[in-house]
Amino acid sequence: MTRKILHAADIHLDSPLQKLDRYDHAPVQRIRSATRAALRNLTELAISENVDLVVIAGDLYDGDWTDQNTGLAFVEQASTLVRAGIPMLVIRGNHDAANLMTSSLPLPSNPDGSEIFLSHDAAESRFFEPLGIVVHGMSFRSRAEKRNLAAKYPDPVSGLFNLGLLHTGLEGDSVHGNYAPCTAAQLTDKGYDYWALGHIHTRADLKIGDGPPIVFSGNIQGRHIREQGEKGCVIIDVDSKNQCEYQFHSLDVLRWFECQIDVTAMTQQDEVLDSYQDWITERLETADGRLLIPRVRLIGESPLHMKLHQNQANLVADLQAISVAHGAGEVWLEDLRVRTTAPTNRSVSVDLEGPMESLNHVLRSLGDDEDLPEIITSELEGLMKKLPKELRGSDDDAAFPVDDKQWMSQLLESATADVMARMDAAADGHTSEAKR
């Protein structure tokens, strides 16, 4: 007897995506509805692939609902699966822990009459006898779950396919909180046949040797630039001997990318635009109708360094125009990050003598000043207080990530390039005037 189980996690249904509001002309509604569309895709995939069971490893919701439509969106998909005869099991994670969710709606029961959500009071085992499958799992009671929940899971049941359903930070992650910590070795020693994990949004299998798959399926839809590339779920194929293999299936309706362009060998700004257009052409061939949302990052030592920093606003407009025209409505530029440097052996027309030499020395020496972060933070303090809450912080999408040393360095580099470019233009102007 062969069986199919669909493993998904981290749906974050109706995730707020507040930071999008700061981007001009962003397709906000299309992006906001992406998690619902991805969930519909999950349902359609489960039915078309004739899966026997769907499991969701936590963070179905992004937190308490702001309106009932969020809950209704899940009820609709769960009901569709039940009508198709497909049972579903869901555990709560740190974002939708039991004590965070004050809103609720009547949920359909599984075809066998059992509830969809697993308990947060204790680990439990759900048996699907006709399928020869048992699922062991436990929901989060509270967001900050620091216990090793896996240690409390029941022993495996002989003769059945044992699946562990767990929301965990495992051994710790630099991006995600270390909730329900445990180790891959501990999960292996439990004796289950497959571990369906949630919480980490990047797909990974931490299987040890001949042990069972220990799989993070990742989230089903990227929600911002830090969640790049294809997103979806995995379908597990279980054979008559309870051995399994699994395959990834994409569910996302839009994708975030970083388009990195090395400008080292470029001498004209138009070459940047040509390179971006080529990138769009290549990505659209495999987009399959999805909206593409790239962030362009320019890197390399280049004689264009000063011009690129100085002309960022115009460059963004040109890149966005290419996105709209060449992307045929399926590409939207998220942002541009100029991370170039001046050539080490650069030759510029600015005469670095006298005052110009002093200015260049001051700008360059600032980069070695240990007090630079405090200086910049102090200068920006007044402006930062006026920013809306969602634009504050220290991550890559914050307006002023003042705790990021690389951002500080790039800010100084950009300012230096801008000043030197302006002085270069002024010097050229004076030379031209003198020749007249």
Image: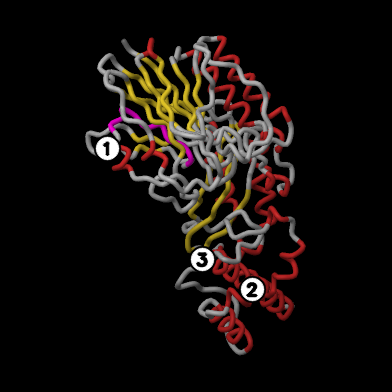
User: How far, Cα to Cα, is label 2 from label 1?
Assistant: 51 Å
Q: Is residue 62 left or right of residue 247?
A: right
User: Label 3 sits on what residue type?
Assistant: Thr
The boundaries of the magenta stretch are 191-199
> Dot 1 corresponds to which residue?
189
In the picture provided, is 266 more to the left or to the right than 99? Answer: left
Q: Along the polypeptide, which appears first: circle 2 or circle 1?
A: 1
| Kind of residue sitting beneath label 1 | Asp
The residue nearer to you, when weighing 222 against 216, is 216
The answer to whether 51 is drawn above or below residue 411 in the figure is above
Q: What x and y, as percent, mark residue 348?
A: 55, 73
- Give the residue at mark 3: 341
Few, some or many residues within 10 Å of mark 3 (<14, 14–19, 20+)? many
Q: Nearer the viewer, residue 135 or 360?
A: 135
Earlier in the chain: of badge 3 and badge 1, it is 1
Considering every residue shown, the one lying at the far right of the view is 386
Q: Marks 3 and 2, Cα distance to the nearest angstrom?
A: 20 Å
Residue 344: quadrant of the picture: bottom left
Residue type, label 2: Ile
